[in-house]
Image (cartoon, coloured by chain):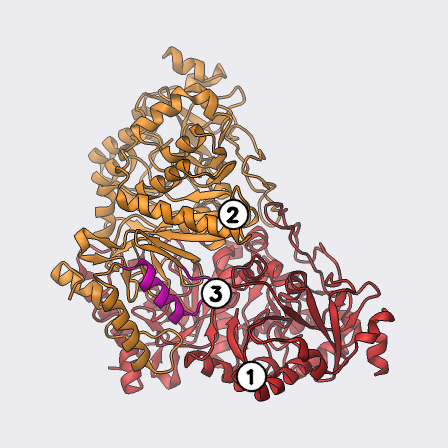
Chain colours: A orange, B red
Amino acid sequence: MTDIQGRVRNKALRSKIATAAEAVSIIKPGMNIGASGFTFAGYPKAVPLALAERIRQEKFQINLWTGASVGPELDGILAEVNGIARRMPYQTDDRLRKSINSGKVAYSDVHLSHMAQMAGYGFLGGKVDVAIIEACAITEEGHIIPTTSVGNSASYVQNADTVIVEINTTQPAELEGMHDVFLHQLLPKRQPIPIVKANDRIGTTYIPCGLDKIVYIVPCDIPDAVRELAAVNENCRAMTAHLIEFLKFEIRAGRLPPNLLPLQSGVGSVANAVIAGLADSDFEDLTVYTEVIQDGMFDLIDAGKLTFASGTSLTPSPAGIKHFYANLPNYRQKIIFRPQEISNSPEVIRRLGVIAMNTAIEFDIYGHVNSTHIAGSKIMNGIGGSGDFARNAYLTFFFTNSVAKDGKISSVVPMCSHIDHTEHDVDVFITERGVADVRGLSPRERARVIIDRCAHPDYQPLLLDYLVRAEKITNQAHTPVLLDEALSWHSRYVSSGSMKV
Amino acid sequence: MTDIQGRVRNKALRSKIATAAEAVSIIKPGMNIGASGFTFAGYPKAVPLALAERIRQEKFQINLWTGASVGPELDGILAEVNGIARRMPYQTDDRLRKSINSGKVAYSDVHLSHMAQMAGYGFLGGKVDVAIIEACAITEEGHIIPTTSVGNSASYVQNADTVIVEINTTQPAELEGMHDVFLHQLLPKRQPIPIVKANDRIGTTYIPCGLDKIVYIVPCDIPDAVRELAAVNENCRAMTAHLIEFLKFEIRAGRLPPNLLPLQSGVGSVANAVIAGLADSDFEDLTVYTEVIQDGMFDLIDAGKLTFASGTSLTPSPAGIKHFYANLPNYRQKIIFRPQEISNSPEVIRRLGVIAMNTAIEFDIYGHVNSTHIAGSKIMNGIGGSGDFARNAYLTFFFTNSVAKDGKISSVVPMCSHIDHTEHDVDVFITERGVADVRGLSPRERARVIIDRCAHPDYQPLLLDYLVRAEKITNQAHTPVLLDEALSWHSRYVSSGSMKV
């Protein structure tokens, strides 16, 4: 309790220190809960565990809004006790995914940059009833120092009358100063977001809150449930090599400066491997303007190649978080966490000319991308921030292995079974096979380049056969589609377990 | 020739006045031509007609980049003589559409806000070789006063070494002062676009050019080929009534201020009718931040309800343009034309909280929108600026009649045959049947609301039957899709001429 007392700097406020069970007593069925957390970072743990316990006994549901995905102590346990009626804007939890696909949880999968506005202006049915925010500390004035993510926390606190702060004593107090919290004026008085470089500071190091809103302060000693990344394999190395070669070509063509433009990369093993791979390149003086800071970026900083990384969250592996904590004095100078409305802001992404690198589940010959659904129906995670970046970037890449499930699934298909990014949004596709640069091409041209450069040889003849027949049969078509056959590859996979004929 | 002399204010520059035939002598096969024009407004006419004549004899092709669609004296005639190899970023011409669908012209259909950046940074194969810009006048310094549109003209002039100015003497010289030309600094030095209200002036009243780039000045007396709008019908009136009722509901709920937020509406008869319909509402003090200023906005200004309209182009009917010219002194105070990179800027659209209203060819039960293709294959026009607004608006509407072709086509389908706007992008769907507000809903919930409120009674049972079977058969699906049946409605239409069973 000593540590927690020290982290609550306002003495009067210490009277609000309580157990998680006490804190969740104020939560009522049907409430909108706005929680901190973006990936397995900075989400509350003790309070939701206590909430789940109450729900297990009392059987009720709440609506859960977060920054993005969160750890099992929030999404997983609440899904398990059937405690979530509605969930936004993103998730990656096994138990929750099952509840969503079975229709038990109403999940609305939105662009991460949109969430704060939608919640704040009452688009989702009422305001945030209770905000639950993981913190390093609370200032004398009652402002909140976040931990390993900012996400939508500042917006939820602003929107709520009632705030529960969960002080996580496993999070080093030295995180203070790494956050930059900027909140928009209310419409119609919004001003430009004054960021012109990845390292610009435009806000406060705390989430503005004040003493009155905080109703409970709960200590917590559960660390972020960070996850292992998959090992970097041959395919990742091939994709990274393709990327580096392509970027060098762009530099030589005068379309990119030698130190590139700010980099964004999606969450996950492939994205992380690609970023880490840049450590072995001869690029220098790089910057990052992204959502999540992953292990690969530590490698880049350690290699002296990355001068600054702006994100909304830290998403390291177990080894990565240890490394981060051990070298905090160094990383403090080179990493900043912003609200996701700012990290994912179309305005800033477009202005800075970000290079966006995200992974696809599949893409089709005409350049559409599926980021969310398996065979059109089952959701995997959600679109996350990929749309914020892909649509607004200077250069937009999508990566995927050319095949999945031991070659039974082709990631390049005649038509995506679900479309999250359209033909209008993507510049370059990369698989381990190669690079398809589709800028300025017509759909038919795109199809030939994508099949030739990105598809797996096992599927290239099938794709080409589809294209040629579609061109003949549709007659006079900008985008030749065989309506009876376009989704047959997915159908075959569902019925036979393979897309192969 | 007197009038043209007066419009070329620099005396030395008058030596460059030439015929269109002389001017096009500098155009070489394979060149990238950057032309002014956005809709049937402000595009060059005399020079492309002469170019077509040369191409008819010499048989060669150029690549044509414009602001958006342009009139028949540019797109139509060049398509007719098979003079276009590549076309970007948008078109609406019958002859060109045919060439695109037949594969003769490589058409790349991109977000209108993206085009200047893509061309300017060399993404499309080289720079602008020759810019052809319709103008009211040229200043003493060699800067260009545009006419009824700005589009990408300023970017193309900036990017080109060689500029042909076509002085259109049918365009009133009093247009001068209505333009506001702002160009970005080059990356990585871009700054915020300092617009915080629709009527903010941030640039120059001319396109910066200078004396040296201008190689020919060609007089032209062909007026903009403005087109008639379809008469406002019962369905348009019903959609407008639904919109007004919905907006009033949002005001009462505190989600919109009484004078709304800046309005955007797409090009065309339905969009125009909806805007015009607001003239009979009791909204006041409205503003517009959009691409095209159509007749409906004159009605709103005349009714004293619209205080200011910002766009990139004027797109009136023949009667509308007459009315505009006759009342220019009044409209000059209330209308501004900006480059499309600014009128369609995600940054500004998001900041101002624009209300985006666009029309769809079809949408599906899960909330995806097809704006471009008939039955998946044939392109109609292109995505235009709809994505710039739909993705970034505060509130995003899509409108369409519930059926087309005398009821043989349902505009609400199980799955769109082409997707330009995803489930993540739309807030509200409106047909003449009603309003589907899908904010925060899961796909299954969206489907029920869309079928119930927007679909035509002839197709409601079929759609509901599809949904219920999909839910059963897919088992455990966030977005239940029957892969073998999802596109069968389009297939049936192609083979039998009707989507009805």
Q: Is residue B363 visible?
A: yes
Residue A51 showing in the rendered view = no
Name the chain under label 1.
B
Give B245 or B385, whichever is nearer the viewer: B385
Compared to residue A145, the image places residue A448 above or below, namely below
- Tell me the SS state at disc 1: helix
Residue under circle 1?
B76
Q: CA distance from mark 1 to mark 3?
A: 21 Å
Residue B161 place in picture, x, y as percent: 68, 64
Dots 1, 2 in contact, CB < 8 A = no
Gap between marks 1 and 2 measured at Cα? 37 Å
Measured as percent of width and height from the top left, residue A324 is found at: 39, 25
Residue hosting label 3:
A440
Q: Which residues are magenta?
A: A437-455
Please give the residue where the numbered disc 2 appears in the rendered image.
Answer: A349
Q: CA distance from mark 3 to mark 2?
A: 21 Å
**As shown in the figure, which amino acid type bears the numbered disc 3?**
Gly
Residue A93 falls in image quadrant: top left
Query: From the image, which quarter does the N terminus of chain B lie in?
Result: bottom right
Magenta run includes residue A451: yes
Q: Chain of mark 3?
A: A
Depth check, mark 3 against mark 2: the one in front is: 3
Q: Position of residue B325 (x, y in %)?
A: 74, 78
For discs 1 and 3, the disc positioned in front in the rendered view: 3
When asked about the image quadrant of residue A44, the answer is top left
Residue in the image at 72% along x and 56% along y: B203
- Magenta stretch containing residue A27, yes or no? no
Q: Residue B357, how many percent across, how many down?
A: 51, 66
* Residue located farthest toward the left when viewing the structure as drawn: A496
CB under 8 Å between discs 3 and 2:
no
